Amino acid sequence: METLEAPVQAPIKKDKALKKIMIINSKATVDSVYAALILANGARMEGIESEMFCTFFGLEMLQPKKMDHLHVATVGNPGLHIPTMIGGLPGMETLASAMMKKEMDKLDIPTVSEFLDIYKASGGKVFACKLAMEMFHLSKEDLWEDIDGVLTVGDFYNRAQEEGCQIIFV
Amino acid sequence: METIIANKQVELNEQGYMLDMTQWDEGIARAIAIEEGIELTDRHFDVLNFLRKEQEKGTALSIRKIGKSGVVGIKEFYALFPEGPLKKASRIAGISKPASCI
């Protein structure tokens, strides 16, 4: 019997050059943390394996008490167009940060805690830097419960020993 | 470009997304899904039907919105449509390519 059925197509295999991305974040500013989260989560959305490594002040985004209260820098941040002396006035940073959060809300951008949950559910991994934790006297109990581990720099590089892996420092 | 999928004539853009969502049916969904390496189950169709409804409403879809929909959790969404769930699911659902960063 003749059928008009088109032949069943085989899955189209697209071999991607970029297979895994590792994002390093060393800062606690809103811009740095969101850039890291969007890059890391965006990789998962494209089917790319994704890991985040938080070091130095980047550990703030992994501390539940602090993660949703991050600030933008009002001093030393020319992009904000606030004169340095005014940017240093008490309350300026809180005000600028609140304004930025409002704008982000309008665009439906999640809070850091929600974003981390979304990222984690996507299969992304989050690591904390061992040395920075020691510097700031942080233990694993101080950090978000869903982190995948605490790494030394050597551990970090070992995780990058794969074909198609790229490292980005935010 | 015009092409035949599952015996139906459909119009696709250069990335393989359907240009007219009314041309879609389950057979087309299954055929596109095979290309994406996915065999569709009822659970997949729950998600696909939700996406199509949202598209009709003109919602800009994001993984976050899907996670909050109550239809499917983010983890399950990634499991159902591995390696790029929002893009793959949109293509299979016959709707336009999502432009979301989150």
Image (spheres, coloured by chain):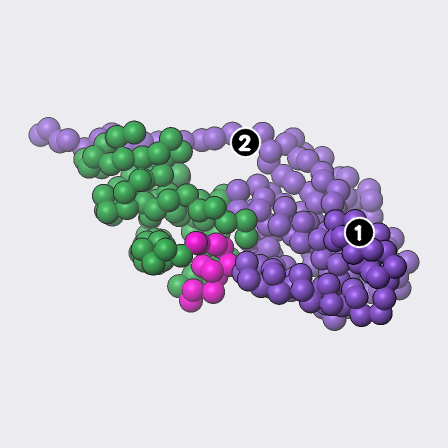
Chain colours: A purple, B green
Can residue A41 be found in the magenta stretch? Answer: no
Please identify, in this view, whether the residue under mark 2 or under mark 1 is nearer the observer: 1
Give coordinates of residue A96: x percent, y percent: 73, 63
Residue for badge 2:
A16
Which residue is found at the position 41% from the left and 43% from the top?
B97
In this orientation, does residue A150 appear? Answer: no
Which residue is found at the position 53% from the left and 47% from the top?
A45
Question: Going by the image, does A39 lie left or right of B15?
Answer: right
* Residue kind at label 1, given as amino acid type: Asn
Tell me where residue B20 sits by quadrant: top left
Question: Going by the image, does A102 lie left or right of B68?
Answer: right
CA neighbours of label 1 inside 10 A, class few (<14), some (14 to 19), many (20+): few
Tell me where residue A2 sits by quadrant: top left
Q: Chain of mark 1?
A: A
Which residue is found at the position 85% from the left and 66% from the top?
A89
Give coordinates of residue A17: x percent, y percent: 58, 29
Pick whichever of labels 2 and 1 is earlier in the sequence. 2
Question: Can marks 2 and 1 be said to lie on one chain?
Answer: yes
In this orientation, does residue B15 appear? Answer: yes
Q: Residue B100 shows which numbered tag?
A: none
Per the rendered image, the range of residues in magenta is B60-70
Give coordinates of residue A59: x percent, y percent: 78, 58
* Residue kind at label 2, given as amino acid type: Lys
